[in-house]
Image (cartoon, grey):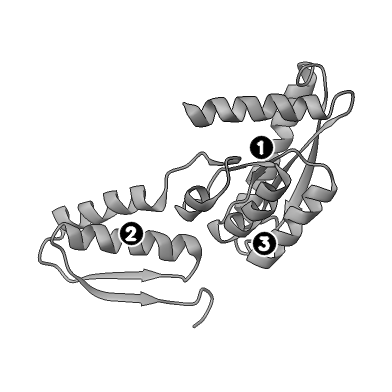
Amino acid sequence: MLKTLSLAAAAAALVANVAYADIVIATAGPMTGQYASFGQQMKAGAEMAVKDINAAGGVLGQMLKLEVGDDACDPKQAVAVANQMVNKGVVLVAGHFCSGSSIPASAVYDEEGIVQISPASTNPKLTDEGGPGVYRVCGRDDQQGMVAGQYLADHYKGKNIAIVHDKTAYGKGLADETKAALEKAGGTVKLYEAITAGEK
């Protein structure tokens, strides 16, 4: 509840600060690269939302302007995108997609007072270590891992279980939490390995 009130207050303050001008918001994510299909979905959703809101009169009579940033789910590129958004006067970012991008970008947004809402970054560090303007609208790795680990313990008792992740913040985070939950429930992980995506 407190976060909801904080977000509402922040949004009102942001709108007040850009009176008589377009309100510049952004979506940032992997518009190119391995996860581009997700980034393109984010972009399409943001464009549709902005179109609908502006058609209904905007926000307190002000029109929204959308900027789009491509981080390709790369941490360094995400920081560069975040700095670009700062220079463009963005007040809110719907993004990033990958946890490995959202976490470093959040430091830039926090320093500049920009609200960040990630639709898909599940690593707990994003909101545990992020500032007061950092939010997510998806479950955390520790929540998902707890369910996955308990499921494995309940349905594969006494079986050989292997957990393999792809070294990304999301993959490793979820794998770590699943392993911890499984072992807490009495299960045993026989193999825990990391692979590099795309390697043969």
- Amino acid residing under circle 1: Gly
**For residue 45, which numbered disc appears in the image?**
1
> Residue at 73% of width from left, 54% of height from top?
82
**Residue 1 spot, x, y in % from top left:** 46, 26
Would you call the spot at circle 2 few (<14 residues within 10 Å), some (14-19), or many (20 or more)? many
Q: Is residue 62 left or right of residue 79?
A: right
Question: In the picture shown, does residue 65 fall above or below 148?
Answer: above
Identified at 14% across, 67% down, the residue is: 159
The amino acid beneath tag 2 is Glu
Give the residue pinned by disc 2: 177
Q: CA distance from mark 3 to mark 1?
A: 18 Å
State the image quarter where residue 132 is shown: top right
178 lies above or below 19: below
Residue 173: image location, x then y, percent: 41, 61
SS assignment at label 1:
helix
Pointer 1 or 2: first along the chain = 1
- Separation of residues labelled 1 and 2 (CA atoms): 31 Å
Q: Quadrant of residue 171?
A: bottom left
**Residue extending furthest toward the bottom:** 200
Q: Secondary structure at mark 2?
A: helix
Q: Image height check: is 200 above or below 138?
A: below
Is 158 positioned to the left or the right of 146 in the image?
left
Along the line of sight, which residue is nearer the eye, 37 or 182?
A: 182
Q: Is residue 22 left or right of residue 125?
A: right
Chain-order first, disc 3 or disc 2: 3
* Residue pointed to by mark 3: 72
The image position of residue 51, as x and y in percent, is 76, 28
Q: Position of residue 184 (x, y in %)?
A: 18, 59
Q: Earlier in the sequence, mark 3 or mark 1?
A: 1
Residue in the picture at 83% in, 42% down:
89
Q: Residue at x 75, y 52 (%)?
A: 69
| Marks 3, 1: nearer the viewer | 3
